[in-house]
Image (tube, rainbow, N blue to C red):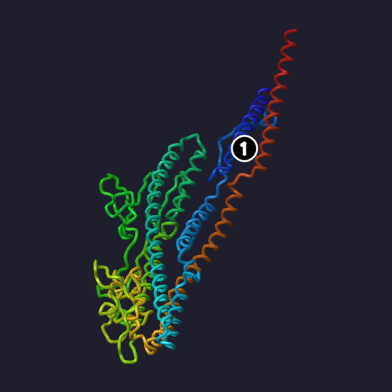
Amino acid sequence: MRSAALFDSAMAGLQSAQAGMMVTSQNVTGSSVEGYVRRTSNPRINGMSPTSIDLSGTSFAVEGFSRYFDSLLQGQVLSQQSKTTYTQTLVQAVTPLDAMLTDPATSLAAALGNFFNAAGSIANEPNNFAYQQSLIGTARQVADRIRGMAEVLGQISNNASRALADVMNQANTLTPQLASVNAKIRAAATPGLAYPSADLLDERDRIVAKLQDLVGGTTNINEDGTASYSVSGQHLVDRETANSFANDTGTSPIRNNIPLTGLRIKVASQDSRNPVLIPIVMNAIQQRASNGTPLLDANGNSLMLPGQSVLQDGKAGAYIHLIQTFVPTVQKSIDLLAAQLVRQVNKAVSSTGGAIAPIFGFKSTAAGGLPITSGALLDGLFRPSGTGTDSTYAEIVEAANPQSSHYKTSVDTNLSRPDFDARLFTVVGTFDTSQFINLDSTASAYLEGLREPFSSPLTFITSSIATTVATWKNDNKANEALQKTLNDQKSSITGVNLDEEAANLVKYQQLYNASSKLIQTGRQMFDTLLGMLSS
């Protein structure tokens, strides 16, 4: 081997060792940084002897640095992350309501049972003063718990509205950041650089992970290393172009009191003057035939297409589902239960045909107005077809659900009246003796007999909520388990193993020492030769 080749090989060894020690130190330092991807140096053969006679040696050079990155696995991790965040958000949001149903101290079923038991006691002893007082006391307990459920639902909806606005405003700060990182990645892709900056790629992945966590969607890594991010096919970031969430006027930040149908995706135009505003949430619309005729089911009800949302996953998708579907459905069920209690309980009459003093009612929405305890409003709610036959509780709930094929706008409108808001449900009965003039054994027996008719709506409310929450919890457990599996697989590729890095550091130190020794030996040889020539 020629002396020049000897020094070339030694210098290549020094450079490779330096690059290896540098990337190892980066890995050790980055092991505690979220989103850091393990890196390695990329050596390449710098020169080889053309023939076996010309023993010029072999040397190496460091071409650059690359990340241990699996794009397919990364896509699976991001997609699953959106689903996991969705179910986690749902479960966390309804925890107060779930606790209220399962705790005997706040259970509506227990309160109604106590009320009917008190009515049964009066049926046996109509003039027992203690039993009469107990009836009004248990009625107040029923009203308190119905109002409590309605208020918890209202709080869930309000919290979801505020959180949704915060999520979209956070996303609006991330989309321009991703576009800026994309621009830097493309600018760094100059001839002679085989790989984009690993730090830029790490930052790109951190931003898209946050976006997926917030609003779901899909991330696509382009050939040039930039990322495109979209929701339901609509780009929020397309390389260096960033769109945003906005109000229906195209302004931001998003207000927390704006209705879902007022939310938009603001798509930037080339001239930046006339952006396109794409609705995020659509209302249910009536299905029509090709000639424009409304489609009806066998019962003559309009067939509706359920309202859709562009945001299906992530925190935003969960909050929209709560606001658009879960809370309104449960709220209407509770409102209807309260209205049914007012209508049925207050209909009790004595053996002589005298009506009892009203027990339940709705506070008037007008200043100084009288509570609603009976009348045409209640009758119209339970007789939507205008006939003399009451619709069942389940039929009315079904007809008031926009997602149902039996949806009727008139029923939904009646049930959504502010007069029937369960938060206005109250006890109008008093503890005065005048309250119990007509509450004889006949009237009390009628009240006790309502236990069975009210078991069905009560079961409907509790079972529907319990089933929904249980489904979310099970889905969340499955999502978290799958998320952990994917994260472990990703970590095995991209994560830093400190033991492995320590071994690499020893290897590179030995390479450095060997290369240094080679140069030192060569220098000693030259010094000896020069000394021999000068003597």
Percent position (x, y) of residue 124? Answer: 44, 88
Question: Who is closer to the viewer here, 482 or 38?
Answer: 482
**Residue 460 in view here:** yes
Label 1 sits on a secondary structure element that is helix
Residue 444 sits above or below residue 7 on the image: below
Q: Residue at x 26, y 46 (%)?
A: 273
Label 1 neighbourhood size at 10 Å, few (<14), some (14-19), many (20+)?
many
Percent position (x, y) of residue 298? Answer: 33, 82
Residue under label 1 = 24
**Residue 405 in view here:** no
In the visual, does 457 lie left or right of 20?
Answer: left
In the visual, does 326 lie left or right of 259?
Answer: right
In the visual, does 1 lie left or right of 359?
Answer: right
Give the residue type that dot 1 points to. Thr
Question: Who is closer to the viewer here, 370 or 456?
Answer: 370
- For the N terminus, the image quarter is top right
Q: Residue at x 75, y 11 (%)?
A: 532
- For the C terminus, the image quarter is top right
Q: Quadrant of residue 154?
A: bottom left
